[in-house]
Amino acid sequence: MSNEFASASLTAGQLNAIVKKLGGHDMALRFLRDEPSVSSPSRSWREEDGIIYFSVTSDGTTGEDWIKRLEGNGFRVGDYAKQVLRSPDFKPTNGVTTEVAVLKGMLFEDNDRITKKIRAEADKRKLSKPNAELACLIREKFTDKEIEAMGLIWIVAMHEPINDSGGDPSLLSARRDGGGRWLDAYYDGPGSWWDRDGGFAFAVSQVSSQD
């Protein structure tokens, strides 16, 4: 019988890829010990090169109904977010699946993390403005722990700004903090500056499943 290792022809990179496929170092050791696989729930998002991808599907929920739906499930909806949701410019869709790309704040230098430059970067990547309801769908889809696992504190939907009751352009955002699971609205002007611990959600593509 040959004493040659079965992995002798594999590169270090290939071996590393196998360990990653098994779920990392600890899961690889469990596999070798023939222990039952206790895998964590699969993520409903993935990250590639500082961009987080996932998809959501709209269901026609109106702005007023989003307030009731979120608050009824223990979420907190900020006053400015309520003003945006109640605006006639908040126009929900039904049965539209959106593939989402979230550009992490770390992709931008501090001085460049302003709305105008973030949107310009999205344009380069062929990303488009999502519907404002995306922020609500994100808030409902992900727990605070999942948003934390993404390395983010908030995810702002980079939709066409909607004016609050004071006439200020605003963007809806899903935010986590010690005070609860929030849907907020942030002021948005071309020169608005953002922290690096957030993410900026754009649409990769939108597909309607309705006739």
Image (cartoon, rainbow, N blue to C red):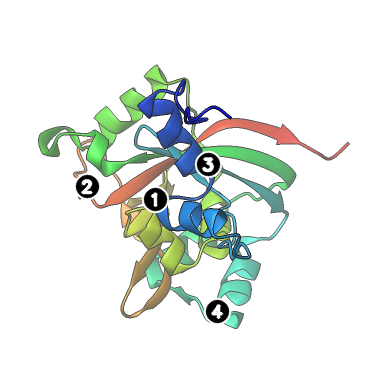
- Disc marking residue 156: 1
Question: Could you tell which of marks 4 and 1 lies nearer the N-terminus?
Answer: 4
Q: Residue 173: give x, y in percent of width and height.
A: 41, 56
Q: Amino acid at mark 4?
A: Glu
> In this orientation, does residue 171 appear?
no
Residue count near mark 1 (Cα–Cα under 10 Å), binned few <14, some 14–19, many ≥20: many
Mark 3 Cα-neighbour bin, 10 Å: few <14, some 14–19, many ≥20: few
Q: Is residue 21 above or below residue 85?
A: above
Q: How far apart in space, not on screen, are marks 2 and 3 (Cα)?
A: 35 Å
**Disc 1 versus disc 3: nearer the observer:** 3
User: In this rendering, would 24 be left or right of 33?
Assistant: left
- Residue that badge 4 annotates: 71
Kindly identify which residue carries mark 3: 21
Is 23 displayed left or right of 63 in the figure?
Answer: left
**Is 211 displayed left or right of 202 in the figure?**
right
User: Which of the marked residues, 1 or 3, is nearer the chain's N terminus?
Assistant: 3
95 above or below 82?
above
Label total for image: 4
Q: Are marks 1 and 2 in contact (CB under 8 Å)?
A: yes
Which mark is in front, 2 or 3?
3
Q: Distance between the Cα atoms at labels 4 and 3?
A: 39 Å
Name which residue lies at 21% across and 43% down.
Answer: 192
